[in-house]
Amino acid sequence: MQLPEITKLDDHIIQVKIAMSYPLRWVNSYLIGGTTAWTIVDPGPRNPENELAWEQVLQELDIPWSALESIVLTHHHPDHAGLSGWFQERTGIPVWISKVAWSEFLRSWGAGNTASADLVEMFGNNGMPQDITDLLPAHLDSFLLQVTPPPVPSFILPGQAVMMGGRSWQTIETSGHAAGHVSLYDPQHKLMLCGDAVLPQISPNISLVPESDPKPLASYLEGLRQLGSYEVEQALPGHRRPFGGFRERTIKLLEHHEERLNAMLGRLEEQPRTGYDICMSIFSSKLTLHQLRFAMSETLAHLVELEQTGRAIAIERDSIIYYESAKH
């Protein structure tokens, strides 16, 4: 097995690329620490290959397991949080996550959860054909293995200072991509560990999810403005490579979502449409089931924002929700 790509960003921060599914291909994990104590931020999804990858990484870097002092999770998604329980079982170290993000973890994968059925129902009510929704439960349940065993969490509070690598990092809790998402800011070195809140080159997915944030796009835009107010020289994202121009990137993402809202509104001005109709007209028709799930949830997040801001109206016909322009 090939050693994951390891990049030493400075004396206290090491970027490790941990494999995940197409199209992103890898998630950025970060080792933050020094000679005697290390924190892992977002260890990646659990599978046998990634377990072996971490064993090889620690051996290559000459970091003993006993030097690991904590895991910090930016959010609950499997590609970020999945291996946290495995690390905790091996080492007994605390796993830090926001209270909101932990609630999302339990809502998605906790005992007796109905997240899969709720999402299927929401998609069906918004026009997704049954031959597609029938495929979703097995697809969604497949992620359970990536987050098993779940960790026993310790909670990060909004604004709490977290010590990593001898540096004090300020926690910034936002929503949109994932409720309870935590970014970590080092004001002394002007570093921002931003998880999936801000990504270079690609736009983070913003999803409407049942029983979660009812206005995810509004929450995300608010978080972008908040994050953009910090003075950042280098951003360390969850995907792609570390980047500069952080504030400018937040502005570009704000503009991107306004353009997408206008594009969807333009289609609604032509005629009433379901969320699935809009999704198919905005995104590629050659999406995998995994990509389609995200595209549909993102479409609904934008349509809800259009409705909540008075630009669109939701109407129900034969148990299916249609959206139309408020101008009609």
Image (cartoon, rainbow, N blue to C red):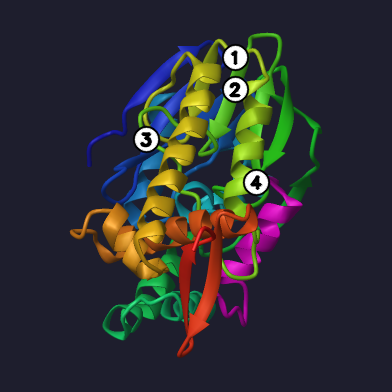
**How far across and how far down the image is residue 39, in percent?**
61, 32
Residue occupying image coordinates x 45% and y 90%: 318
* Quadrant assignment, res 229: top right
| Callout count | 4
Mark 3 and mark 4: span between their CA atoms? 19 Å
- What amino acid is found at the position of numbered circle 3 in the picture? Ile
Q: Counting other residues with Cα less than 10 Å from the Cα at mark 3, is it few (<14), some (14-19), or many (20 or more)?
A: few
Residue under label 2: 192
Q: Which of marks 1 and 3 is nearer the N terminus?
A: 3
Q: In this view, does 74 lie to the left or right of 317?
A: right
First to last magenta residue range: 94-115
Q: Is residue 54 left or right of residue 13?
A: left
Mark 4 and mark 2: span between their CA atoms? 19 Å
Q: Which of marks 4 and 1 is nearer the N terminus?
A: 4
- What amino acid is found at the position of numbered circle 2 in the picture? Met
- Whether residue 308 appears in this view of the structure is yes
Mark 2 and mark 3: span between their CA atoms? 17 Å
Residue 101 included in the magenta stretch of the image: yes
Residue occupying image coordinates x 45% and y 55%: 298
Q: Nearer the viewer, residue 278 or 225?
A: 278
Q: Which of marks 3 and 4 is in front?
A: 4
Residue under label 4: 219
Q: Which of marks 2 and 3 is in front?
A: 3
- What amino acid is found at the position of numbered circle 1 in the picture? Val
CB atoms of marks 1 and 2 within 8 Å? yes
Residue under label 1: 232
**Please, is residue 317 above or below residue 11 in the view?**
below
